[in-house]
Image: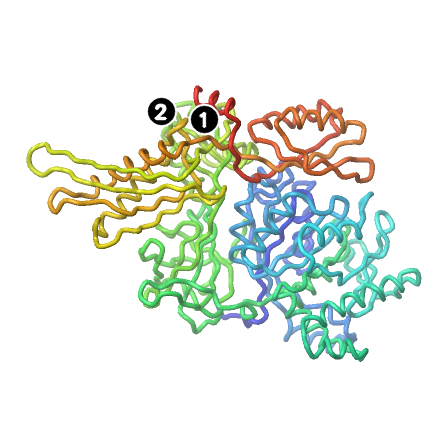
Amino acid sequence: MPKQYSIERVRDIGIIAHIDAGKTTVTERILFYTGISHKMGEVHEGKAIMDWMEQERERGITITSAATTCFWTPSYYRVGVTDTDKLDSIKDKHEHQINIIDTPGHIDFTVEVKRSLRILDGAVAVFDGVAGVEPQSETNWRYADEYKVPRICFINKMDRAGANFKRSFELIKERLSSNAVLIQLPIGAEENFKGVIDLLTQEAFKFEGENGEEMKKIEIPSNMKEEVEKARKELIEKIAENDEKLFEKYLDGKEIPFNELKDILRKAVIDIEIIPVMTGSALKNKGVQLLLDAIVDYLPAPTDLPPVKGFNFDHGEEERRSEDKEPVAALAFKLASDPYIGNLTYFRLYSGVVKKGSYLLNTTENKQERISRILRMHANHREEIDEMHAGDLGAIVGLKSTTTGDTLADPDHPIILENIVFPDPVISIRVEPKTKIDQEKMGVSLRKLGDEDPTFQVSVDHDTNEVIIAGMGELHLNVIVDRLRREFGVEVEVGRPQVTYRETIKSEAVGEGKYIRQSGGRGQYGHALIKVEPLERGTGFEFINAIKSGAIPHEFISPVEKGIKEAMSKGLYAGYPITDCKVTLYDGSFHEVDSSDNAFKIAGSMAFQDAAKKAGVTLIEPIMKVQVIIPDEFLGDVTGSINAKRGQIKSMEGRERVKVVEALIPLAELFGYSTELRSATQGRGTFNMEFSYYAIIPDNIAKELAGE
């Protein structure tokens, strides 16, 4: 299939938001206005195109990120082109391809946001105009900062009762970024929300017609002219700060041409020096066309960003530019199991051209993969194509060895791109198959689900032979169990949710492991000396090889590390995995004949156990950031309940007729909290939570858990 769009006219973007901010509705409107769908899908009716899973439509939330491609020509009448023939000729030259990933807003499915932002060039952050910045908005923003993703803010739901544009904007500046700047103002609010004002062009737009598709230019309301002038001055100043010559013109009081302002604004957005803030109501079809214009105008094409960096074993660090003529470099960011065509591997192609029937090297696993079929995805619909070009997102059918985070590259020019690091699960449950047939199918089904979702883990308790599944929250595991039943036909009994505790060391210590066995014939000899040190919470595990002068041969270093990891996985205090620990292998010895991989693996395990016992081991537990929204009259009861749950209240804020309490509470105290809160507030209170960090458990509770 010939390529239709030059890479300069491609945008790879994600839509991110807290749950219920209207993110999927924004995406549905984008699909409607770009002609991909001819009827608007509504989330509340269970008909959203991008929420294609049964569980998504039943719950009215996004669970898995969905990818789609659409095409958009900016609204050129904004710069004076009204003649139909001229508009048609411009359309041929200026239509853009927008690859979109609609991500979940619920914290339990945060993996989908993280892996999507890793491979995207830009993002639209959607905010509820009533609630403003919510907890998952902050988490998503951190991920976008981590991967240096340029973004646009869209303050949605301006038609709702209680919508407050100014307050939402101030919260964005206060909690997320001081680089946020208004490029639009709303005309009215709540039931009086009529349209928006573009501060750069100084034009006002009103949205009419059944679907809001009639975007009419109107006069700026007289009572807003002073506000518009002030906001525009702030915008121009912020733009001018990003270009020396422009700033001189601004200081001299000279009029700056529109095109110059727009060019510098685009550059500043790509450099994340400016984050434009827009507004509208996706449900009422107001403002989405202008948002599409901004995506094309300000978010980067793949060529606007620095070349992707990777590692080559022969040459060290390498770069790949977003060009077809470069060798192929692609990152697999998601796996999905399709009942009709098998395994799908979603990938971002950073450079080169991938063709059907070609071979690529999985450089992470050093295994060759055949590219049998390439698909362009439209949610759960697909279009088969012969090739994909630099900058594209797509899916490959039937890869054998590739998992999330693996790199696919030209076999003659291998490169390994930066992997994706995922958070550890915080909650687990026991699952037991109902029948022998279910037992036979369960293992395969759980493995497939684990391949799709790196935050979902399966293990076996060897003492009881029970299967334990772990994930990011109760909803996450409920959906997994539901998918087992519906997609794989496996019925299971489910145990009570359990917190996924961890262990960690308290201080520095050294340890020795010496494994010597003589049993006739060849013996076994491994000897390792290590030092352990605690690391910051959330750091995980770090292994340092400090062996000098060949005290331990190079081939035995990896077995020592494996032995240490094995010992850490079993824990020492209460059987939970040990984390946030740095281990330095600094000395040891070997035997010319008797030393083996297995001997050094056992020595590594023994050395770690010795060092950890000296350092002292303690339990740590997941602490959740919780936001509780309640009517004013229930504030006392709710704050008392939070304190009783070992919670720390961080802030209390008043909104229209409600109070918003933010607190840090141990996950162990939150099971059943939804029912408890509804009971305490006559069904009017709601809450949401997200993982924040691991903290040391009080001694009395730790001893109780160790006893269990």
Residue 290 is situated, as x and y percent measured from the top left of the image, at 73, 62
Q: Residue at point 73% right, 35% down?
A: 629
For the question of whether residue 655 can be seen, the reply is yes
User: In the figure, 422 relative to 236: above or below?
Assistant: above
Q: Is residue 208 visible?
A: no
In the picture shown, does residue 279 fall above or below 219?
above
Nearer to the camera, 55 or 708? 708
Q: Residue at x 59, y 55 (%)?
A: 14
Callout 1: SS: strand
Residue at 65% of width from left, 56% of height from top?
124
- Left or right: where 192 falls relative to 265: right
The residue labelled by disc 1 is 430
Which type of secondary structure does the marked residue at label 2 adopt? Answer: loop
Residue picked out by circle 2: 465
Residue at x 85%, y 64% (from the top left corner): 228
Which residue type carries mark 1? Arg
